Image (cartoon, rainbow, N blue to C red):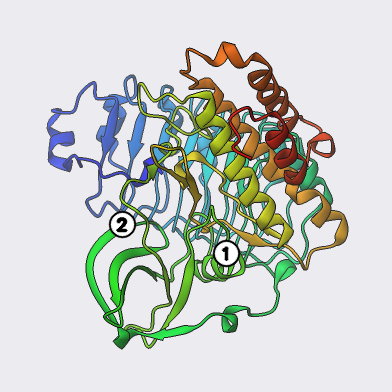
Amino acid sequence: MPINKAVSLHSLSDLQSGRLAHESRIDLACGLSEFPDELFGLANSLEVLNLSGNRLNQLPDDFGRFKKLRILFLSDNDFQVFPQVLAQCPSLSMVGFKANHISQVPEGSLPPKIRWLILTDNQIETLPVSIGRHQELQKLMLAGNCLRHLPDELRNCSQLELLRISANQLHELPNWLTQMPKLSWLAFAGNPCCAGDDIEHSLEAVHWDELQLSCRLGEGASGVISKARWNDRVDVAMKEFKGAVTSDGLPADEMVASIAAGQHQHLVEVLAKVAGHPEQKSGLLMSLIDEEFSNLAGPPSFASCTRDVYPEGRSFSLSDVYNIAEGIASVAWHLHERKIMHGDLYGHNILVNQAADCLLGDFGAASLYDNLPAELTASIERLEVRAFGCLLEELLDHLGDANASLNIDALSALKTLQAECVNEQPPKRPTFKDICSRIEEANPFSSS
């Protein structure tokens, strides 16, 4: 996510000397225990303020002077109460308070234009009923708190598309949650309501001593992926889980979902779990992905909020769109047959090659829902169908096939399907089984 990107930090001395006058973005991480009054000198220009990684526990009463401030990061500080003064900031649309000690979010404390709210890894037990007033709220990150219920007023947030409520104390999910008109990316693992049997025993265990690590392949919020040689026989990818709560939930739940997903041609194969790690970390061995695969898209930006960002000039042929849509619909059907919601069905979690072969990865937001009440299990799939509809819309928006007009019926079929997938009445959306059938029927490029 963009909030994790490395930034060039400013110094307190530069701020105090006036060298940062008229800056629109300030990044300060220097052990601050009090809010620097010098920042008010930028009240007429400041749009992004990042004070993460300090020791702040409150904001000044006149913080509302920052009339142009759009984005505020205060993660890894010492706040215990969400500052009510933020309600006085008319332009503030993105707020991040990850990893503080917040236990209270007072009524009426949210900024009026809030669009993206990050409260991950705190101690929040209840949300204010006033949250229902915020009609522009699209993204709500609440993983790793102490929530026991969601206020009914949250259903009034009709623009909400992404909700992270994993690793809380929810004993039930409200039925209205699956009826929200735009909710598409939901993570709820690690709550009492979906606790189930431990399935890790179903996978072979490989001891750490049988592995020889070589190069690091990548790192995400939940773990590090490295290339390894298994028993001097085969090269594999090994994921070491970090153990701390992420914006999506708990790495332990990601591991369980990855195993439960089983095998599918559009999934990275999970081969074994790792035992005997010298630092007591959990780990998985997976098939090594061919280097010709790359991410379909980049993650959402500040501006796009819930939509992926595609490289400039990226385009797809109609054949590519059909290939990707068919593959992802197929693997999503496979997952929901196993009562698994991926929770993060996005282009940035899909790997593709030049032939438009695709692999769905990253189970960090996945949730097993077999133990939920029947009325919920029947409707959860339709949320992910909307995520698929958003993906299909993005693919069609990047259609660069000059010959697509020669397949007008095939193109029309995809556009009709896409519209049905994002219907604001979830029961009217097709299932993934229906989607697979319709794509196969309309696909003029199919070899079958």
Q: Which residue is label 2 attached to? A: 218
Q: Secondary structure at mark 1?
A: loop
Which residue is located at x 20 percent, y 24 percent? 21
Q: Is residue 205 left or right of residue 177?
A: left
- In percent of width and height, residue 197 lies at 69, 79
Between discs 1 and 2, the one toward the N terminus:
2
Q: Image quadrant for the N terminus?
A: top left
Which residue is located at x 63 percent, y 20 percent? 411
Instruction: Identify the amino acid type marked 2.
Output: Gly
Q: Depth check: 282 or 237 in front?
A: 237
Q: Residues within 10 Å of mark 2 (few under 14, many from 20)?
A: few
Q: Depth check: 206 or 245 in front?
A: 206
Q: Quadrant of residue 24?
A: top left
- In percent of width and height, residue 390 lies at 60, 32
Hey, which residue is sitting farthest front in the picture? 448
Q: Is residue 282 above or below residue 52?
A: below
Q: Quadrant of residue 219?
A: bottom left
Which residue is located at x 64 percent, y 44 percent? 329
How far separated are the C-alphas under marks 1 and 2?
A: 23 Å
Q: Which residue is label 1 attached to? A: 263
- In percent of width and height, residue 138 lies at 60, 35
Q: Residues within 10 Å of mark 1 (few under 14, many from 20)?
A: some
